[in-house]
Amino acid sequence: MKARMVGLRDYGSTLSPQSAWNLLQGVETLPLRMERHCSNAQTVAEWLEGHSKVSWVSYPGLKSNKFYDLANKYLPRGKGAVFTFGVKGGYDAGVKLIDSVDLHSNLANIGDTRSLILHPASTTHRQLTEEQRDGAGASSDAIRLSVGIEDVNDIIADLDQALNQV
């Protein structure tokens, strides 16, 4: 009995045939989804870098990023889909931005096929002092973005209309 329970606890139960098939479909299409995630993230990061209401963008695919050369060396097929940027206006502007998006979901998880957005200072890191948040990379102006596989023009349009409300 103990061996069975420890195995279930440590490894989980056996997948149902339907769950196994769904998992296989997901694994088979992962490279296609990641290509789209990375392409969209690169385009969105470049667009944000030129926006008047954005003070900084931290994405290794941008030439302005201090890790750009390393990212090109180690991540030649894409620099990922999760990054942060700073919205001018600090904490209140960050909260307003999150409240103004339509397409993006305000969620803390990452890696979904849909675009997600989060203001860490008012959610995941709100119990910390401002100094602690800054030390953790969750400054008052920081916005975390997990770029999905939607049409990149829709992603940008949603961010643009939200930034214009800040």
Image: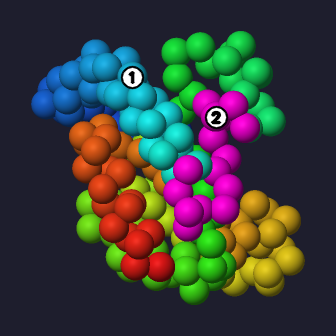
Say which residue appears at 13% left-offset and 31% top-offset: 18
Mark number for residue 35?
A: 1
Q: Amino acid at mark 1?
A: Glu
Q: SS for tag 1?
A: helix
Q: Is residue 34 left or right of residue 140?
A: left
Image coordinates for residue 24, horizontal then vertical, percent: 25, 20
In this figure, which residue is indicated by the disc labeled 2?
A: 62
Image coordinates for residue 66, horizontal then vertical, percent: 80, 36
Q: Amino acid at mark 2?
A: Leu
For the residues labelled 2 and 1, the Cα–Cα distance comes to 17 Å
68 above or below 166? Answer: above
Q: Is residue 61 magenta?
A: yes
Magenta residues: mostly which secondary structure?
loop
Q: Is residue 106 left or right of residue 95?
A: left
Say which residue appears at 45% left-offset and 74% top-offset: 97
Q: Is residue 164 left or right of residue 149?
A: right
Q: SS for tag 2?
A: loop
Say which residue appears at 57% left-offset and 28% top-offset: 79
Tell me which label, 2 or 1, sits earlier in the chain.
Answer: 1
Q: Which quarter of the figure has residue 126?
A: bottom right
The quadrant of the image that shows the N terminus is: top left
What's the magenta region? Answer: 50-64
